[in-house]
Image (cartoon, rainbow, N blue to C red):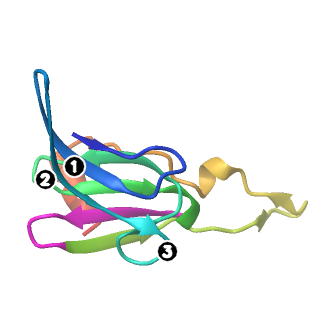
Amino acid sequence: MLKSKKNYTTIVQAKLAPFKYEFVTKWGSYGSGDYQFYLPFGVAVDSSGNVYVADSFNHRIMKFRISTQTTFQVNISYSPIYGSFNLLTPPSQNEPKERRIEREKREKNELR
């Protein structure tokens, strides 16, 4: 089980069994560097055990390879102003909320 809560900056990994919760590891702190988050909003795991975190206010998706302790990131383009009317960019376009693993093939072509 992996969890991240709104307004928290730590990702926790644990094993779940009936009537048992076994802590495995945790990582993260407040910030914008590697292993740091600013409002992580969603967590997903692919079939290879890679962990994806939607790091909302840092405008990025983080990919963690736990087995090799490496990280990758994809920045979500952020522009506070768009169009000729100087409207603010809707948050949904620059603050990722979740990462879903849809297909193994598609996942391998994204976020390398």
Q: Earlier in the sequence, mark 3 or mark 2?
A: 3
Mark 2–mark 1 distance (CA, rounded to whole Å)? 12 Å
Pick the residue in front: 69 or 98. Answer: 69
- Secondary element under disc 2, as helix, strand or loop, is loop
- Report if the CB atoms under discs 3 and 2 are less than 8 Å apart: no
**Circle 1 or circle 3, nearest the eye:** 1
* Amino acid residing under circle 2: Gly
Looking at the image, which residue is at 19% across and 59% down?
108
Q: Is residue 31 magenta?
A: no
- Report if the CB atoms under discs 1 and 3 are less than 8 Å apart: no
Looking at the image, which residue is at 23% across and 54% down?
107
Establish if 38 lies above or below 44: below
- Mark 3 highlights which residue? 32
* Amino acid residing under circle 3: Ser
Magenta residue span: 59-69
Looking at the image, which residue is at 69% across and 68% down?
79
Looking at the picture, how far across and down is residue 95, in whole percent?
57, 55
